[in-house]
Image (cartoon, rainbow, N blue to C red):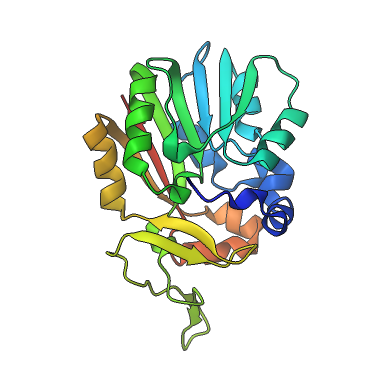
Amino acid sequence: MAQNIYDNPEFFAGYSQLRRSVYGLDGAPEWPAIRALLPDFSGGRIVDLGCGFGWFARWAKAHGAARVLGLDISKNMIARARADTSDPGIEYAIADLDHLDLPEASFDLAYSSLAFHYLQDFDRLVRSVHRSLTPGSHLVFTVEHPIYMAPTHPGWSVDSDGRKTWPVNRYAVEGARRTDWLAKDVLKHHRTIGTTLNTLIGAGFAIRHVQEWSPTDDQVAGNPDLADELERPMMLLVAAQR
């Protein structure tokens, strides 16, 4: 079972104050890049894996999806998503993505934002998602970049010019990594980019786009805190097709 850190009261309270939690997709600086990867899903059926507060589910339904299923392991997340959603075409359910079995050929798009790095068995999930998609349909997801997930403690240092640097720790050693972020002992699972992409290929997906996301100059000008994301990639964006 994946660690359900989002039902930890300390973690959930901190997460709820993040910009992306307060402002939704507009508060996520990577959203324009993700949106550019999305296929035409008009009239389609979408599964949102790790749906959180339901921001993407509501956006997708408002932009032409026929039906959206949002899945999350967290009771707190699902309760908030249901409270903020009134569209009968959107359904939410509690599910552990590490043990997920989706019905065959039931969806036209699978989407996930910053959830897969919590999973131990990525291969199992990818194969389940592949079976659940109709031929030619797409999987679009983001994860924490493995460079971001494998820093030396405490995560960054300062060089002689006063710039932050992020040396990595055992990048090639995959597996469980624990960190203190919003709460103590948050468990994530480190995989290299090669493993991530080859797992998709092995399940039958064709890779359509890979992006090591970084903010634009305009985004940094509007939010100087994003300048740190130019030092090392924080997110990996992937689009694949069945």
**Image point (49%, 76%), residue name:** 156
**Image point (72%, 50%), residue name:** 16
132 in relation to 144, above or below: above
Residue 147: x and y in percent read 39, 62
Quarter occupied by residue 175: bottom left
33 in relation to 148, above or below: above
> Quick one: 28 or 176, which is closer to the camera?
176
> Quick one: 223 or 209, which is closer to the camera?
209
> Quick one: 209 or 203, which is closer to the camera?
203
Quarter occupied by residue 184: bottom right
Quadrant location of the C terminus? top left
Quarter occupied by residue 190: bottom left
**Image point (46%, 56%), residue name:** 188
Evaluate whether residue 65 shows in this view: no
Residue 120: x and y in percent read 39, 49
**Image point (31%, 52%), residue name:** 193
In the displayed structure image, the side of residue 169 where residue 110 appears, left or right: right
Judged from this view, the residue extending furthest toward the bottom is 160
Residue 141: x and y in percent read 45, 38
Residue 99: x and y in percent read 43, 36
